[in-house]
Amino acid sequence: MTNYLLINAGIKILIAVVFSLVLIRKNIYREAMGLFLILFILGQIIGYAFDLDILKIVLPVEPNPASGTVTQLISSTIFPFLLAFTIRDLRRWEEGFQYDFYIRVMFLILIGIGFLQFLPIASILTNILLILALVFGVLGLYQKYQEN
């Protein structure tokens, strides 16, 4: 990796960490942001340690890596963010689920389907997950309109 790539990755990781810590200090989504911080840092460590491009926040631009970088927000930042809020909601199982829980699970499944596109697996699994995502989306909309 070039120095530019390392500096760019360091700055973006630092921004995510500082943003999370500010929200935690202000008691805004304290539990979910703490989970996000752990998932995000673990994802970056695993991504850069084992050279898993799907987990890295910054990748070099092909075909000339010295010319610039590409930021992967979905797999490096949004996925841990949604996963943290979903885990927080699952821990509050007794209170019942709100519509946003179902919508977050739907988005997590859709992102998971996107990850599966990089693996040589049967398309039946993708179809099952797509149906599951649709079910969670419909449950979320039903819950939202039932609350109003």
Image (spheres, rainbow, N blue to C red):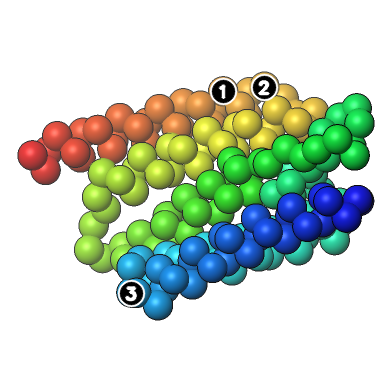
Q: Is residue 87 above or below residue 130?
A: below
Q: Residue furthest left?
A: 148
Q: Is residue 39 above or below residue 121?
A: below
Residue 99 left/right relative to 109: left
Tag 3 or tag 1, which sits nearer the N-term?
3
Kind of residue sitting beneath label 3: Asn
Give the foreground label among 1 and 3: 3
Quarter occupied by residue 121: top right
In percent of width and height, residue 80 lies at 55, 54
Q: Are marks 1 and 2 in contact (CB under 8 Å)?
A: yes
Name the residue beneath numbered marker 1: 127
Residue 88 left/right relative to 122: left
Quarter occupied by residue 146: top left
Quarter occupied by residue 24: bottom left
Task: Name the residue nearer the viewer: 37 or 95.
Answer: 37
Dot 3 alpha-carbon crowd within 10 angstroms: few under 14, some 14 to 19, many 20 or more: few
Kind of residue sitting beneath label 2: Ser
> Residue at position x 63%, y 64% from top?
14
In percent of width and height, residue 131 lies at 46, 26
Name the residue beneath numbered marker 3: 27
CA gap between label 1 and label 3 equals 40 Å
Residue 46 left/right relative to 36: right
Task: Name the residue nearer the viewer: 5 or 91.
Answer: 5
Query: Does residue 18 appear in this view?
Result: yes
Dot 1 alpha-carbon crowd within 10 angstroms: few under 14, some 14 to 19, many 20 or more: few
Which numbered disc covers residue 28? none
In percent of width and height, residue 45 lies at 76, 63
Query: Does residue 39 appear in this view?
Result: no
Which numbered disc covers residue 123? 2
Task: Name the residue nearer the viewer: 115 or 135.
Answer: 115
